[in-house]
Amino acid sequence: MKDYSTAQWPTTHWHALDDGRVQCDVCPRECRMHEGQRGLCFVRGVEAGEVKLFTYGRSSGFCVDPIEKKPLNHFLPGTSVLSFGTAGCNLACKFCQNWDMSKSREMDTLADRATPEMLAAAAQRLKCASVAFTYNDPVVFMEYAMDVADACREAGVKSVAVTAGYINAAPRVEFYKHMDAANVDLKGFTERFYKKICGAELGAVLETLEYLKRETSVWFEITTLLIPDENDSDAELDQMTRWIMDKLGPDVPLHFTAFHPDWKMMDKAHTPPATLTRARNIARANGLHYVYTGNVHDSAGSSTYCVGCGKRVIERDWYELGEWQLDAAGKCLHCGTRLPGVFDGAAGNWGAKRMPVRLAAMAR
């Protein structure tokens, strides 16, 4: 039986250095820390000569969302997902739209507590088909996320990682053994963008995407937030979508979403809808079958079309589903072509609503 009385949790992906410091091996940052220091993520640090996680069992909040908000369009469409995050992040994106949580160094931001078993039970009670680790990157709280995923699997609830994919090879293998689905942020397609805007490196993210495709059965989709004059040029979009086609194939869904000014990029304009459409057209011209626009009302760009006959099989407007032309197994009712993804019967009917939840109150 695990002791959940402390948020300080032992971890395994680290090693001691000859100079007395301890190196965290979870992500490519490989933070090297003295006793009492924290890594850049601020939630993993050294105590008693070991790297520990300081946010196990604590959350910045829980909310029931539509699965399309993650965004996942081919994973149990129309169902609800119990979403939560903790604090901290291993990237430093200047445009972060959850910066109050991902950049928090205040542990009192973590207002709610929940054991893995409590979370699985809450998802069942709330009739959520899945639990999503989101708001901040689950890579930095991987021990908690994996335990929650295991408890959910026993309860018949699936687990979703919403992540930047910035993780080293060994923890990557361990982490994704526990996940059913993922949405990976491919934030741009140049090392300049990753270094200047995100404080990271592109290569590790591409390795994660290739690993997911070649080595796992995890259903995954990709999201790129298009920022005007930063990662939205025709040349970069062409290069990125050609890479996806070549390395991952035509059936991995790709979401182009609209940027709004936030955190350290308040001087940037909103992404014009025309930019999203332009990006979608480039991706489709390069052979990708399922390319979506997001954070805008665009039914044509957010709906799903059958590759076999061209008919619309899932109508969407933002997070709302409309016309549904698939059978229980995800096959087109017009021509029988199976849509790639995870389908289980008819579409869910959760809709676009967002419902905050206090798990501590539910447990009383």
Image (spheres, rainbow, N blue to C red):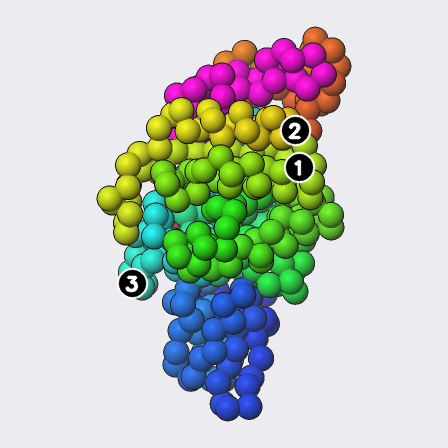
- Which residue has dot 1 on it? 245
**Above or below — where is 55 with respect to 255?**
below
Locate the N terminus by quadrant. Answer: bottom right
- Which residue has dot 3 on it? 106
Counting residues from the start of the chain, the first of labels 1 and 2 encountered is 1
Calculate the distance from the C-alpha at mark 1 to the C-alpha at mark 3.
42 Å
Viewer-side residue, 35 vs 214: 214
- Callout 2 touching callout 3 (CB < 8 Å): no
Q: How crowded is mark 3: few (under 14 residues within 10 Å), some or many (20 or more)?
A: few
Q: Residue 87: horizontal and vertical position, in percent?
A: 38, 57
| Magenta stretch holds residue 301 | yes
> Can residue 80 be seen in this snapshot?
no
Q: How many marks do you count on the picture?
A: 3
Q: Residue 248: horizontal and vertical position, in percent?
A: 68, 41
Counting residues from the start of the chain, the first of labels 2 and 3 encountered is 3
- What kind of residue is marked 3? Glu
Calculate the distance from the C-alpha at mark 1 to the C-alpha at mark 2.
7 Å
Viewer-side residue, 154 vs 243: 243
Q: Which mark is residue 287?
A: 2
Q: Element type at marker 3?
A: loop
Q: How crowded is mark 1: few (under 14 residues within 10 Å), some or many (20 or more)?
A: some
Q: What stretch is highlighted in magenta?
A: 292-319
Q: Residue 246: horizontal and vertical position, in percent?
A: 69, 40
- What kind of residue is marked 2? Gly
> Can residue 212 be seen in this snapshot?
yes
- Callout 1 touching callout 2 (CB < 8 Å): yes
Viewer-side residue, 57 vs 229: 229
Q: Element type at marker 2?
A: loop
Task: Please tell me which residue is depicted at 61% across the width and 18% down the height of the picture.
Answer: 305
Q: How crowded is mark 2: few (under 14 residues within 10 Å), some or many (20 or more)?
A: some
Task: Please tell me which residue is depicted at 53% across the width and 25% down the height of the picture.
Answer: 281
